Image (cartoon, grey):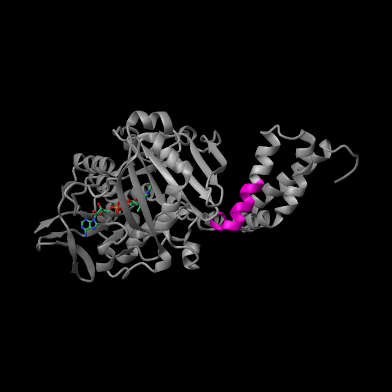
Amino acid sequence: MKKYDLIVVGAGPGGCTAALTAAEAGLKTLLLERAVVPGEKNASGFALSSKAWRDFPFIREMELPSMRYCRQCVAHFLSPPPEMEERFTIASGPSRRMSYPEARDFFTVGMLRREFDPYLADLAVRAGAEMRTGSLVTGLVRENGKVAGVLLEGGEEYRAPLTIGADGVLSPVARMAGLRERWRPDQVTSVCIVDFSAPRERMDCVIHEAGFQAFFGPGLGGNFLIAYADGVHLGGPGVTNSLISRALRKRAKPARELLDTLLAPPVQRLLRALEAEPREWQAHCLTWMESIPEEISCAGLMLVGDAAGLTEPLYAEGVWQAMYSGRLAAEVAEEALRENDFSGAFLKTYRERLVESPVGQDFVAGAQLRQLFELLGDPVLCGELEELAVDLAVHLLMSGQEPKAEAMQRVFPVLGENLPALMAVARVYLPIFLRMGEENLRFYIGMAKGLRWMLKGLLPWEGDL
Ligand SMILES: Cc1cc2nc3c(=O)[nH]c(=O)nc-3n(C[C@H](O)[C@H](O)[C@H](O)COP(=O)(O)OP(=O)(O)OC[C@H]3O[C@@H](n4cnc5c(N)ncnc54)[C@H](O)[C@@H]3O)c2cc1C
């Protein structure tokens, strides 16, 4: 039986980052992965947020064949079935107001997990971690009421005062540790993906840097397209088919929704232009919660990434969260070893720090904002908002079909007609702003005063507003 300072179960983004951090800090670290090669089950790609470039120096060095920078996000709003044609489209580059340089340059980078996971695992190994692949963890060793190691299929035993469970959403480690039996139905969603390969030159020509595209529309859930160097995937349920709609059991048919989006003419045209060939179909379970679960550690054990339920509550992004929590757990492990304290009480500091960290901050208002997508998922409301956008943006500014003054005169009636839809949006936003505290409230009151002053200068009549 071999002994280590730290055992990490699972060589996904969370486990590899934990093992890398621990090995760099000089901990004798064992990284166990059930697959023969890390990331082997994922033929498909994913989008890594620019946050990873901000937070992890080793990511800045990364160059993988499948990488494609996404500097343009596109939201397609389609008309109702049966046409499902492009009705209103927004495309945007990154904002110059973002708080760090990478975010001002790009949104995400699309790439393949079967390249990314081995890249991270290799960094951990080069830092000194011992990796064992083809190693399925089937049990935990307990000693004096704490987790003291793991058992592999076949009976091998490894010991360490600390274990990190980075074994993904179904996390056998969490179950074996008694932290939970299984996720409740309202804590998870299912994600379906169809992955297509496409020649690189077609990708460069047709997609270029528009690596994230979402398809909204009456009855469509905002299924998303993610592009990498040699292909794209289309996934769903879209962000609009939120946890709330699942909880209310309104719409929970991700495969049906994905098929509808795939069959929409603009999507078909895009796939034809790409000369795309279907490569893989997947359906996965994914946690999608409103706050960080309470029980993510116990004596001798911490959970990171999907095992801890850390996917971000708006878009269900989870790779950066897994990496961030993996690093944090390894830092806490190092401190625990220094203090020789592996108690449940000491390891609770891991969750406390996580709540304070950018991962935790992302849970504030994320679930509430999800209600906006929920509105877009409502066929009637979505249709009304689409028409409002078309009337205000397109016909006012971009069409010469009518005299300008006539188009201008429609602004207030159109706003009036669509007041219920606008109020529905305001009903989501306002409580979020109010929750964000007095400081923000002051800011918005200041803005309203400024607007009043501007209008006073612009209006043709004298006097107060
Ligand atoms: C379809 C889909 C698309 C997604 N797209 C994105 C995206 O574009 N961007 C993004 O940021 N996030 C995305 N996510 C979320 C993201 O994939 C996860 O949040 C992320 O993979 C979590 O990383 P992890 O290291 O916690 O777990 P995982 O990546 O699940 O890694 C867990 C590892 O543990 C291993 N393992 C499991 N059990 C055992 C065991 N008993 N013994 C040994 N090893 C074990 C597994 O083989 C695996 O390698 C997507 C999720 C899905 C389902």
Q: On the rendered image, what quadrant is the N terminus found in? A: bottom left
- Please indicate, yes or no, whether residue 342 appears anywhere in the rendered image: no
* Callout count: 0
Q: Residue at x 38, y 46 (%)?
A: 320
In percent of width and height, residue 68 lies at 37, 34
Asked where in the image residue 146 lies, by quadrant, the reply is bottom left
Q: Is residue 23 above or below residue 189?
A: above
Picture coordinates of residue 418, whole percent (x, y): 70, 53
Is residue 404 visible in the rendered image? The answer is: yes
Q: Is residue 40 left or right of residue 56?
A: left
Could you say where residue 91 lies in the image, as x and y percent from the top left? 53, 37
Instruction: Name the one closer to the observer, 310 or 352.
Output: 310
Residue lying at the far front of the rendered structure? 82
Give coordinates of residue 52: x percent, y percent: 38, 41
Residue 208 higher or lower than 265, as above or below? above
Q: Quadrant of residue 379?
A: bottom right
Q: Main secondary structure of the magenta part?
A: helix
Asked whether residue 153 is drawn in magenta, I would say: no
Q: Residue at x 67, y 53 (%)?
A: 422
Residue 129 vertical position relative to residue 346 in the rendered view, above or below: above
Query: Looking at this view, is 119 or 244 the one in front?
Result: 244
The residue closer to the viewer here, 338 or 90, is: 90
Residue plotted at (74% across, 35% down): 402
* Residue found farthest to the right: 462
Q: Is residue 382 magenta?
A: yes
What residue range appears in magenta? Answer: 374-388
